[in-house]
């Protein structure tokens, strides 16, 4: 009975996701990603590769196919099925993005909720890190008391930080914030409303849209005392934007276990998963992965891993 149900589920998934043989015969690998500093940017209609695009392009060449980018407007679009977040649906539920793409290649961290619905192949270590303006002198969780912390509502960073604060009996006060395009900044609670004995969460609705780097700039401009980012994105931003590197720094991790960024694909993409895993092993052994790390993050993989492990809680 269980086997029959499993076969029905897998059949339903495969109704719109392509098989590996179909990808090979089409000679095109369709990869979903957003346009940003970690994936690619468009300049005068031309794609300028960043780390994820460059790695995906190499994978397509490894398969002997061309790459086709399926543009994704918002991070939430990776997780929607018929307008609903897949996490509210019985597993496995395949996001609608796989009606158009074979895999995703973006800044997507592995967690248990996502693994229930997708194959997630890790390619680099990654942790959620609280970062701050150097002037704030925040080095540990207790230093956040009385400060404003800008976070996306319902995302891993909020959940993990809440758990840490609860374990240490540190209270939280919550504010809703939104991005005001005309002022190019987030709404900030009045100082009279800030609880000096609590950590003050400024929560952004995760469906909100805003310009690139907005969260980083909020901390840079001291509109918030701290925020969160995955370590891979954070170190890339600090390397690429010298003014951020001068004023922003990682404080501590909100995750006890090491995380990983991943390429994702539907549950039935077993052959594609195998090929991608073998590809990653090859490019790490032959130095190409190090080449990309140095080009886009100015740090080799070994050094990056040491930095991430050093910033563990």
Image: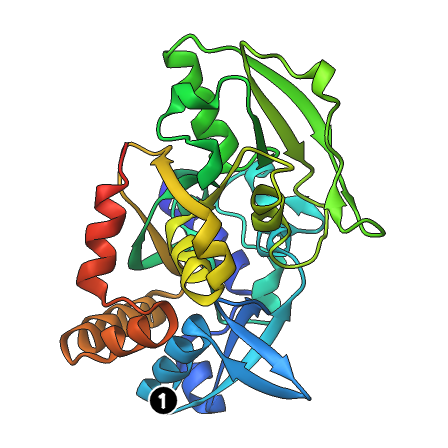
**Residue visible at 32% across and 69% down in the picture:** 298
- Regarding residue 184, the answer to whether it shows in the image is yes
Q: Quadrant of residue 165?
A: top left
**Residue visible at 60% across and 47% down in the picture:** 215
Q: Position of residue 273 (x, y in %)?
A: 32, 66
Q: Position of residue 19 (x, y in %)?
A: 44, 74
Q: Position of residue 185 (x, y in %)?
A: 73, 46
Q: Quadrant of the N terminus?
A: top left
Q: Is residue 89 above or below residue 140?
A: below
Residue 14 or residue 188, whichever sits in front: 188
Name the residue tied to disc 1: 61
Residue 13 or residue 214, whichever sits in front: 214
Q: Position of residue 177 (x, y in %)?
A: 72, 33
Q: Is residue 266 above or below residue 202?
A: below
Q: Quadrant of residue 146?
A: top right
Q: Is residue 254 above or below residue 184?
A: above
**Residue visible at 27% across and 42% down in the picture:** 258
Q: How is the image coloured?
A: rainbow
Q: Quadrant of residue 16?
A: bottom right
- Regarding residue 265, the answer to whether it shows in the image is no
Q: Is residue 164 left or right of residue 18?
A: left
Q: Is residue 165 left or right of residue 171?
A: left
- Residue lying at the far right in this picture: please name it: 182
**Residue visible at 41% across and 83% down in the picture:** 57
Query: Helix, strand, or loop for circle 1?
Result: helix
Q: Residues within 10 Å of mark 1 (few under 14, many from 20)?
A: few
């Amino acid at each position: 009975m269980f086997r029959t149900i499993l076969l029905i589920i897998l059949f339903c998934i495969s109704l719109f996701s392509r098989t590996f043989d179909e990808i090979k015969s089409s000679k095109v690998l369709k990869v979903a990603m957003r346009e940003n500093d970690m994936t690619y940017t468009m300049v005068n209609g031309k794609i300028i590769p960043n780390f994820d695009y460059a790695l995906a392009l190499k994978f397509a060449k490894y398969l002997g196919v061309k790459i086709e980018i399926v543009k994704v407007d918002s991070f939430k679009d990776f997780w929607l099925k018929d307008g609903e977040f897949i996490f509210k649906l019985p597993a496995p539920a395949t996001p609608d993005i796989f009606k158009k793409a074979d895999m995703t290649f973006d800044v997507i961290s592995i967690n248990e909720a996502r693994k229930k619905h997708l194959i997630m192949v890790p390619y680099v270590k990654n942790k959620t890190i609280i970062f701050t303006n150097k002037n704030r002198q925040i080095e540990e969780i207790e230093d956040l008391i009385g400060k404003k912390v800008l976070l996306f509502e319902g995302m891993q960073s909020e959940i993990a930080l809440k758990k840490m604060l609860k374990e240490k009996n540190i209270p939280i006060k919550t504010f809703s914030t939104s991005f005001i395009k005309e002022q190019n900044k987030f709404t900030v609670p009045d100082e009279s409303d800030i609880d000096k004995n609590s950590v003050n969460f400024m929560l952004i609705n995760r469906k909100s849209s805003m310009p690139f780097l907005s969260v980083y700039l909020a901390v840079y401009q001291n509109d918030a005392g701290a925020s969160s980012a995955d370590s891979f994105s954070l170190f890339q931003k600090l390397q690429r934007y010298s003014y951020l590197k001068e004023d922003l720094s990682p404080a501590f991790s909100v995750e006890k276990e090491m995380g990983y960024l991943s390429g994702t694909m539907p549950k039935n993409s077993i052959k594609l998963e195998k090929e991608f895993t073998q590809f990653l092993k090859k490019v790490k052994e032959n130095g190409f992965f190090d080449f990309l790390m140095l080009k886009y993050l100015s740090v080799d993989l070994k050094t990056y891993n040491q930095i991430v492990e050093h910033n563990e809680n």
